[in-house]
Amino acid sequence: MRIRMQAGNSPRDLALPRFDMAVTGDALDDRGRAAIALAGELSNGLTSARYIPETLQLEFDGRQIEVEDLAEQLRPEDSQRILIESTTLGFAETFLCCRAVKEIGHRSISFLYVEPGEYRRDERERKVVRQRDFELSNEIIGYKPIPGAIASLDQVPAVDESHPHNVVFLLGFEGERMDRAIEDLPIGPRWCYLVFGVPAYKAGWELDSFANNIRVLTEGDFQRGPQFCAADNPVALIELLQEIYDARSEETQMFVAPIGTKPHGVGAALFAIERDDVGLLYDHPRRKEGRSVDLGRWHFFDVQFGDS
Amino acid sequence: MTVNRKMTTANALQTACTKNRAEEFGFDVWEHFVIPFFFEQLDLGETQKPTIVIGGRGCGKTMLLRYLSHASTFSPKKPEITQADLRRIGLYWKADTQFASALTAREVPEDVWENAFHHKLALVITAELLRSLQNLTRSRCDAVERESIESLRFDGLRAYGDEYCGELRSLASNLRQRERSFQLWVSNPRSSVVPSPVFLPGRDFVIAAIEEIQSQIAELSDTTFFVYVDEFENLLSNQRRIINTYLKHSERPLIFNIAMKRDPLQMRETVGDQSLENVADYRIHDLDDYPCNATFTLFASELLFFRFASKGAKTVPIDVDSLRNPSALDRRRDPAYRERVIFEARRIFPGLTHAQLAHAALNEPAVKKRLSSEIERVLKARGSNRKSGDFLNTQDKQAAIVSSCLLHRSSVTPDEIAEELAALGAGQENRFTGRTDWIHNNFIGCLLRLYSSHPKLCPFYAGFDTFIQLSRGNIRHFLELCHMSLKRTESANLEELRIEPDEQAEAARQASTVFLSEVRSRGQHGNRLYTFVLTLGSLFAIAHQRPTQGEPELSHFSITGGKRPLSDEERAFLLEAVKWSVLIEERETKLKDSVQVTDSEWILNPIYAPYFKITYRKKRKLELKSDEVAVLISGSYEERRALLGRYAERWDVEMQDLDRPLFAHLSKEPSDAD
């Protein structure tokens, strides 16, 4: 797999091809709207996708389908160029699209991602309760499986094995997401890797990720030191995951929990589709219409499957 | 060398209470487990009945189950393995609910998924069974020869497939292979290249494996294996039904038990319409019911010193071996022992008496200034010629503080209050301490009100006994309070260790903040629960600002009247709040109002009290209407804001008197809303 990455302050800074199809999610904020608008300009048609974790189905182009049938939806032409608009798509949709594209033998897939703009930190520094604290309405589905990367954390041990699984948490701002995983699932903290997006999109943003997660890191029984990987770099993330994958024993099952940045999610998805023994742990947050304004940097990831 | 050793010990004291979740200890918790006082009530010696263990997060449920399971029973650190240990072997399974929820839909018939779940159970439990034998070989058990286990053969399982017969290692390896294949199939059930597994018949397969073991190892021929299924409530409904059936039809040598959070809806499904008392088929242990304040106080203090001892502290008032020994419970109930241990815990975490709290408050310049300004303001408003000194310059500082609220009451004049103060000072009958008991009834409420806008938290939240009340039987909460208090100590000597009340109070606020933020990760409705707690806590915080302190220390509510009854969804939400220990439900003993919607009282978990700067004591109740509760549960921001505003107005609470960090949003202009 070859991945070419481009980044710029606007789409004009990127060399963008045309696409036959762009798969998008819901535009909940300015950057989502801008990303979908660009995807529409670059492609012959927009198609929406939304994973339904309760039924393990996908709402694709307005119709509810089985996940296994997505590949058929993404044919008809083998040379079809597909753009995954990952600003608006969630991780599950991104992974399922990658998997389907690979299944039908496409040679390439591309991703678009727009970073958020300015980030208000004053309320976090002063711990002032704001209106938004009363309006948290993100529905948290909880950790539910994604077909194609379903694996069990249950201990079905081989003889004398020391630990049956490694979980790699790709961390973001929301500390409660890893907390939920540790509480709800049979995860042994000592066998977990914690990956922070460093450098962050903007200098200083990583402090919030540290602040919200460092307590768990220092007070939980995590025996592996923190890992760092640039927040906007899926290639580096794949390399890190590969290192962890190669370092484990054959009997140890690897899981990835992509609860951090979207570029890390793209990297996790591409990593997982290449292996059938990697499980994904994801809690499917549903975002309400947000108040995020401004756009950050634009990213374009172009992936070529097969030998280079 | 001496310096380094001291630093190490200081660090040891700082980190003694860091771990407060069972998951952090692994599966062998034998050396970390302190036998709780209700252990005898579990009746583990003789009963062969299935058990339902109920408890909220932090009650010690998982720790208990792991203690009862083979990894702990056969811990290599355990000095002796008894015959009783061999007769009861626990197999702990914390269900991987994210995987279990994959066993559904995707155009696969439900009966196939049910068979798949039976298969999953067979794989997991048999694997645990084999692991228990491996742990037995690593233990100090003399009764069973290691060779007899290693030479075990499971040829009797051939009926289920050739791959299941052979030696123990071979079976273990094959189970692992089957698990991997099963996972692959679950991930791709309709794939033509991934073969469907031949499903094992759940319980029957496990029993067949047990029979192989018992026919070859005489020492285990009388063993009963107890399966403990944790996180039961998070399985799918058909999966719970399957385990329910296993539970109800359990008999030797395999008994199923389940562990779950308190969830009345789930309980009805599990036990049917029968009452939640022990029934013929199984026993119910509600762990939240067991610790009363008296035993929890001792247990918590023992646990504290147990942790210190595990970090190398030598001068502890407990005997570590006794705390690990179920037979030593009577010794631990000795009054002299109890007094000694609790005394030491109080030495480390000293609290303040009410008199000391009053002195501490008036030694805080900002608090004293607020008190003085308050008194001046209300005297002026009432047209009194008196000065604040008339009320502050008294020997009884509690009375001075209470005076600030009494002066707001129209039922009593400033002169009358001053006269009562004088009588108090003269040792005469007075209303501050007599039948009216102004101090007893109002002091804490008045004190908290004074501190509300002070950056430093009131030392009311300090003290070992206070930590006991804040944690209310929750071990995790207690350990976190201790941890936050200890983490900055520089003391290296346990005998000299003492955490100042101010530091404890700050630690309580930090712990409270942590647990409040964790509400968001509690189940599917975590965010709604968080908003609910934030609003309810804010409402109580406003009540604590009431100038007259007419009903001081509001910390719980009941639902009385209203335009409409609570909907099913709203009732379910309240039960969800109870399930996650955000609220504690208590049944009222008397009904005051014949149209009460419910006869329950709902107490905000006291662990949140430091965050909201409200009382942790259960004193006064707020009667809310059902539509007001509905706003708390599912109201929009504007509805919540209006509710808080209405009560602030009703209670004469001025916006500037409200704690800025908590109520900043109420004072913002709409255009500033973020």
Image (cartoon, helix red, strand yellow):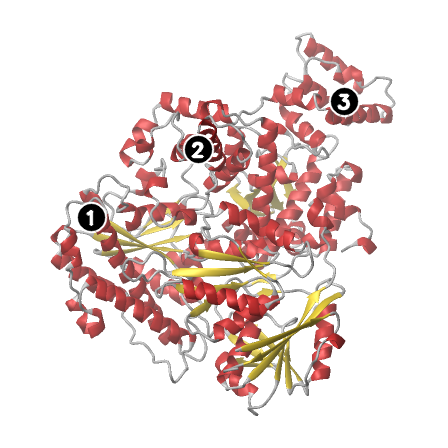
In the image, is B130 to the left or to the right of B530?
left
Q: Residue at x 31, y 61 (%)?
A: A157
Looking at the image, is A44 positioned above or below residue B15? below
Separation (CA) of disc 1 from disc 3: 72 Å
Q: Position of residue A165 (x, y in %)?
A: 40, 61
Which sits earlier in the primary sequence, circle 2 or circle 1? 1
Q: Quadrant of residue B383?
A: top right
Question: Which dot, 3 or 2, sits closer to the camera?
Answer: 2
Residue bearing mark 2 = B304
Residue B503's disc is none
User: Are discs 1 and 3 less than 8 Å apart at CB?
Assistant: no
Residue bearing mark 3 = B412
**Looking at the picture, which amino acid does disc 3 mark?**
Val
Which sits earlier in the primary sequence, circle 3 or circle 2? 2
**Looking at the picture, which amino acid does disc 2 mark?**
Leu
Q: Residues within 10 Å of mark 3 (few under 14, many from 20)?
A: few
Q: Position of residue A160 (x, y in %)?
A: 28, 57
Which sits earlier in the primary sequence, circle 1 or circle 3? 1
Looking at the image, is A182 positioned above or below residue B463? below
Q: Quadrant of residue B424?
A: top right
Say whether residue B438 is visible.
no
**Looking at the picture, which amino acid does disc 1 mark?**
Arg
Instruction: Please determine if labels 2 and 1 lie on a single subunit.
Output: yes
Q: Position of residue B203 (x, y in %)?
A: 27, 64
Q: Nearer the viewer, residue A21 or B633?
A: A21
Q: Position of residue B270 (x, y in %)?
A: 39, 58
